[in-house]
Image: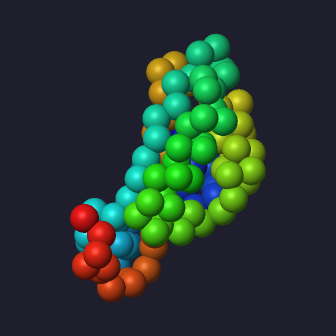
Amino acid sequence: MVILFDEQLIPRNRAYVDIEDRGYQFGDGVYEVIRVYGGKMFCKTQHLSRLEQSAKEIRLHLPFSLERLDTLLEELVSQKPAPGRNHLPASEPGNRPPEPSLP
């Protein structure tokens, strides 16, 4: 299985998460699920907009623009048309201290 990881398409078994990743340590993160039908992402624009809004709500910096993410996802889907859905997890790398004001 090929996945999108750090702006690269790589085999899933080569992906790793640093122990200092905020998502790993504190559970900070957002995700969207985009269904793929016949090699086309369903309601892609709405899903990407919701991902961006969710990230803003918890003050999570997305590592690239929605336009770049769109391009990367199109490349991923075109490489191997996958039935079902694609998960879009997002977490902020690094060791920023937790924000007590966030739920």
Q: Which residue is drawn at 53% across and 52% down?
A: 53
**How many marks are shown on the rendered structure?**
0
Q: Which residue is drawn at 43% across and 80% down?
A: 94
- Horizontal side of residue 19 vs 41, given as left or right: left
Vertical relation: 1 (above or below) 92: above
Residue 91 in sight in this render: no
- Horizontal side of residue 92 vs 76, given as left or right: left
Tell me where residue 43 appears, x and y as whole percent: 61, 26
Q: Which residue is drawn at 51% across and 19% down?
A: 83
| In front of the other: 38 or 54 | 54
Quarter of the rendering containing residue 74: top right
Q: Residue at x 65, y 41 (%)?
A: 73
Tell me where residue 44 appears, x and y as whole percent: 63, 32
Residue 86 in sight in this render: yes
Tell me where residue 86 appears, x and y as whole percent: 50, 34
Tell me where residue 55 appears, x and y as whole percent: 48, 58
Vertical relation: 48 (above or below) 99: above
| In front of the other: 56 or 95 | 56
Picture quarter with the C terminus: bottom left
Quarter of the rendering containing residue 99: bottom left
Vertical relation: 80 (above or below) 101: above
| In front of the other: 44 or 56 | 56
- Which color mode does the image show? rainbow
